[in-house]
Amino acid sequence: MGLTSLMDIVSIIVVYLLKSYASDPVLITPIAEQKIPMSKMDAAIKEGVPIYISSRELIFKEEQVAVLKEGELDPSVVQGHIIAPLFEKLEEETEKSKAIFEGRGEEWVGHVILIGDEALKFSTIVDVMYTAGRLEYSEYSFCIIQKG
């Protein structure tokens, strides 16, 4: 092997390593008209199921599952703190995720990433967390924008 071939291989490995270490496994893209709260916290979000909540809609898997009015859920979709349309969609995702983890021989831990609007009512966040909790999601991360 010549020196040129070795330099090509080293260059490819360096580019691959830079790309893989520089990219974050969790990519959060705010939805339209969403103002993510600001905080001084500095912690990375670990991988999980993202749920977007703006002051007008609740989105799961890029699909609107509920409409909000001024940051509050329509009472017709909430029964005993369970948001029925979100529960159905999240249940499907949970079954798929558990099957993947079981196939790998790993223990499944339910993790939800809540990307909420700063104008949300606390009761809406409670309903979303309760709905996820009924499907064995026990870990939650709240998406924020770091100040300063």
Image (spheres, grey):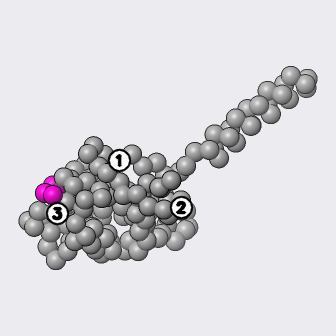
**The magenta stretch spans which residues?**
66-70
Kindly report which numbered mark, 1 or 2, lies closer to the viewer in this rendering.
2
Q: Find disc 3 in the rendering and name its residue.
A: 72
Q: Is residue 53 visible?
A: no
Q: Main secondary structure of the magenta part?
A: strand
* Residue 121 point in image, percent of width and height: 22, 66
The mark that comes first in sequence, 1 or 2, is 1
Residue positioned 90% across, 25% down in the render: 3
Q: Is residue 137 above or below residue 39?
A: below
Toward the left, the furthest residue is 76
In this picture, residue 16 sits left or right of residue 48: right
Q: Is residue 69 magenta?
A: yes
Circle 2: element type:
loop
Toward the bottom, the furthest residue is 80
Residue type, label 2: Asp
* Residue 44 point in image, percent of width and height: 53, 59
Q: Find disc 1 in the rendering and name its residue.
A: 30
Q: Find disc 2 in the rendering and name its residue.
A: 42
